Image: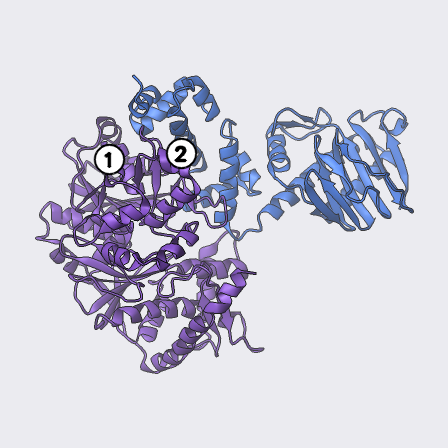
């Protein structure tokens, strides 16, 4: 049987899925790698470890699930998390670790650029909000803070470029990831002269931007032999995790949006037009020649609830976080909507959309003598989802959204999915796939070999099951709480700053 | 409280125990200025605070000690008091010899009935845990008190009992340190700490038991958690780290392949080459050729 492999280079792990040509998963495996924080604002990973982990996981999966059953690999399609930066020298050797999306070292550089007259033009042309996550800001940081590394850098790569270069010898970056660097013109799909000038680099120091269905060449012979895949196996450069998750969520129609909540989270839509936001809060990333994925990312996803569980949950078995979280969710369900006037602002890691404030912090508001752990647990979950709703509200300025599709481990917990329906006051559907990102990668690869006419048809083929309907009474309750939530977030901006400056 | 002091060489009670350098229990009734100078510790020292409040410094770390606290000071560490004197109070101690061959090989000596692998494990916990903060363990003070009783009273089979209690003391302290390092909630955190230790000691031949012990877990639970968290068995995860490090070293043309193999924990360049090729398809020298522009 022919099969398609998707390789998802995520924030904490590489996940490899094998699909048959109809999109059924016939095997999957993961391997994690650590994130280093040598200083408080730093988030780095070891590119060689990611590469070896990927090879190892891929090889095991192929041996156990593919070769042993005489399946044949037709194509391998890549996905990666956005905004990573890896400086390499002229021999192709990394100059230090990979800087990930979560790295905040460029706060000063970001705020200087945000205040500069060219900020508006750069944001509009590149689609990437100006924030320390943006590789543009990271390069400026390198230029200012580590001029010797900056001077030695031959290429500013992204994780995916590096991995694909190891495997094929070619240095490319798909349009989706390129459009998340803050350096590519999302209309012309080429490196933006203004942004390059601001970063102080040349276009030839960046990978070549290519469409997501571009094939960067065959696997180098050694890898082909060691992995045991046919010479004809096609490598597809693929897209970003965010764009693939949106493609795989089946929200092609204008009246739909998708909510992804894993550790971090996002609300996204697909369309032909770039959504222009005067406050520069929305991203617009390139999906293909005619389509953009737009929306807002949040730092405050499942990681916030995990934090709560680790601090305050009961661990019946050592290290059994899953059961501990399940218990807390059951407990939260016994507190009423609004957790009896307890609100939580979930900014434990600062926040991106919609407030784009790295100094923001978590807040419990309205604590009362009668509150118990169940109320706090519920308030934490509700807080995470109010934050999603505040991103949705930015999108409502541009779209008439009537239906939501959710994916990701946190959003697809039934209790959370129902809460989303109630808070958003919209019907919510759940994608049948374990991973929307990998589903997106499958859809692209399947379109490439002719299973679907185009990616629109591919996206429309995604089956959404289980509709959660909003409970009208609860929706009214949440609307009241949300307005307090929004007020608080706005009012506290000055105090977050004061706290940061203590 | 029985006040006494035994010294190797002058106290007959210690004749049968050449590994015990000194032990005792003392009460400090008055402050003597300049009485507590900085010393570089030569033997394994365990102190147990009975009464009073102390402020000591081990290397750069300040310790605030209260009754019930047990402190372990390893050979080579600098012990001092920021105030320069011993505060008023009472404490019990034992100093004994332990061989530490390198950073983590640890042999209590023939008197001990701990097995070689148990010594490895305990050595790991004692020597790799960065901060040997005082372990609040009722266990340790109880054991130390019985040990001293055995020495003074010399009852039937006291020779065996003293050595057993010394082993017991080491085990109790190691368990306490392991538990402090890991309260059983956040596996990602303790796995990250383990990972750092593995990276810092890649050349070492880690066994799964040692890795588990380093984070204070039993081997079975450790295997299950590592597999579900990382996707790999502990051994395979370690191979990942080794090959990733080897790739970095291979990019430096001045290093020779055998050194790289040994530095990254492979027992021979042959073993290194086979493992490297199995994973990447390249032999280490082919990989180097391709990635350094060297011919």
Q: Picture coordinates of residue A1 (x, y %)?
A: 15, 41
Residue A314 visible here: no
Numbered label attached to residue A321 = none
* Tint of chain B: blue
Numbered label attached to residue A68 = 1
User: Which residue corresponds to the image point at 21% horizontal and 67% vertical from the top-left?
Assistant: A256
Q: Quadrant of the C terminus of chain A?
A: bottom right
Extreme residue toward the front, this view: A117
Q: Quadrant of residue A299?
A: bottom left
Camera-side residue: A229 or B81? B81
> Seen in the image, is B15 located left or right of residue A140?
right
Q: Picture coordinates of residue B198 (x, y %)?
A: 50, 34
Q: Picture coordinates of residue B250 (x, y %)?
A: 38, 24
Chain shaded purple: A
- Please tell me whether mark 1 sits on a helix, a strand or a loop: helix
Numbered label attached to residue B240 = 2
């Amino acid at each position: 049987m022919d099969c398609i492999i998707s390789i998802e280079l995520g924030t904490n792990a590489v996940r490899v899925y094998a699909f048959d040509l109809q999109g059924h998963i016939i095997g999957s495996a993961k391997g994690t790698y650590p994130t280093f924080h040598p200083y408080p604002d730093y988030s780095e990973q070891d590119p060689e470890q990611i590469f070896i982990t990927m090879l190892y996981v891929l090889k095991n999966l192929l041996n156990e699930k593919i070769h042993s059953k005489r399946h044949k690999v037709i194509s391998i399609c890549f996905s990666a998390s956005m905004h990573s930066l890896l400086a390499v020298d002229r021999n192709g050797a990394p100059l230090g670790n990979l800087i990930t999306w979560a790295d905040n070292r460029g706060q000063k550089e970001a705020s200087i650029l945000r205040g500069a007259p060219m900020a508006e033009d750069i944001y509009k042309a590149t689609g990437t909000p100006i924030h320390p996550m943006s590789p543009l800001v990271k390069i400026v940081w390198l230029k200012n803070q580590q001029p010797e590394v900056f001077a030695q850098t031959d290429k500013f790569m992204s994780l995916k470029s590096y991995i694909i270069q190891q495997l094929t010898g070619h240095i490319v970056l798909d349009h989706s990831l390129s459009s998340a660097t803050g350096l590519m013109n999302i209309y012309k799909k080429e490196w933006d002269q203004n942004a390059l000038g601001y970063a102080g680099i040349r276009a030839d120091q960046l990978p070549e931007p290519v469409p997501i269905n571009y094939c960067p060449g065959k696997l180098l012979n050694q890898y082909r032999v060691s992995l045991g895949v046919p010479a004809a196996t096609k490598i597809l450069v693929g897209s970003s995790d965010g764009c693939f998750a949106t493609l795989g969520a089946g929200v092609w129609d204008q009246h739909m949006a998708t909510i992804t909540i894993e550790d971090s989270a996002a609300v996204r839509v697909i369309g032909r037009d770039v959504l222009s936001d005067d406050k520069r809060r929305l991203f617009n990333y390139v999906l293909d020649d005619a389509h953009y994925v737009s929306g807002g990312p949040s730092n405050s996803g499942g990681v916030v609830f995990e934090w709560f569980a680790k601090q305050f949950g009961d661990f019946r078995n050592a290290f059994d976080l899953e059961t501990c979280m399940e218990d807390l969710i059951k407990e939260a369900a016994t507190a009423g909507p609004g957790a009896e006037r307890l609100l939580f602002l979930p900014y434990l890691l600062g926040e991106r959309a919609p407030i784009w404030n790295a100094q923001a912090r978590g807040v419990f508001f309205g604590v009362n003598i009668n509150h118990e752990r169940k109320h706090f647990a519920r308030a934490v979950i509700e807080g995470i989802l109010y934050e999603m709703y505040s991103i949705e509200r930015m999108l409502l300025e541009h779209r008439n959204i009537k239906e939501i599709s959710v994916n990701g481990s946190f959003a697809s917990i039934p209790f959370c999915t129902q809460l989303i329906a109630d808070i958003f006051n919209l019907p919510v559907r759940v994608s049948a796939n374990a991973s929307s990102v990998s589903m997106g990668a499958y859809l692209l690869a399947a379109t490439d070999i002719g299973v679907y006419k185009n990616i629109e048809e591919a996206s429309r083929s995604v089956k959404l099951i289980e509709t959660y309907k909003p409970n009208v009474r609860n929706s009214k309750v949440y609307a009241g709480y949300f307005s307090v939530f929004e007020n608080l977030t706005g009012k506290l901006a000055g105090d977050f700053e004061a706290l940061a400056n203590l | 409280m029985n006040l006494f002091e035994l010294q190797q060489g002058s106290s007959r009670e210690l004749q049968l125990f050449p590994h015990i350098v000194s032990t005792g229990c003392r009460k400090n009734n008055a402050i003597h200025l300049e009485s507590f100078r900085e010393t570089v510790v030569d033997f394994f020292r365990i102190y147990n605070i009975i009464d009073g409040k102390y402020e000591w410094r081990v290397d750069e770390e300040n310790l605030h000690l209260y009754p019930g606290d047990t402190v372990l000071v390893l050979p080579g560490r600098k012990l001092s008091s920021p105030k320069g004197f011993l505060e008023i109070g009472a404490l019990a101690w034992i100093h004994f010899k332990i061989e530490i061959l390198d950073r983590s090989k640890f042999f209590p000596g023939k008197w001990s009935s701990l097995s070689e692998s148990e010594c490895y494990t305990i050595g790991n916990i004692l020597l790799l845990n960065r901060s040997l903060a005082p372990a609040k363990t009722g266990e340790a003070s109880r054991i130390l008190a019985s040990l001293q009783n055995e020495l003074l009273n010399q009852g039937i089979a006291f020779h065996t009992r003293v050595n057993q209690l010394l082993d017991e003391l080491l085990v109790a302290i190691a368990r306490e340190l392991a538990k402090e390092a890991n309260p059983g909630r956040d596996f990602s955190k303790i796995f990250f700490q383990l990972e750092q230790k593995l990276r810092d000691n890649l050349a070492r031949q880690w066994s799964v038991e040692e890795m588990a012990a380093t984070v204070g877990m039993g081997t079975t639970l450790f295997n299950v958690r590592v597999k579900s968290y990382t996707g790999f068995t502990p051994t395979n995860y370690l191979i990942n780290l080794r090959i990733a490090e080897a790739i970095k070293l291979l990019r430096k043309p001045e290093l020779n392949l055998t050194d790289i193999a040994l530095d990254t924990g492979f027992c021979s360049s042959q073993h290194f080459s086979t493992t490297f090729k199995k994973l990447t398809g390249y032999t280490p020298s082919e990989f180097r050729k391709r990635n350094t522009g060297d011919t």
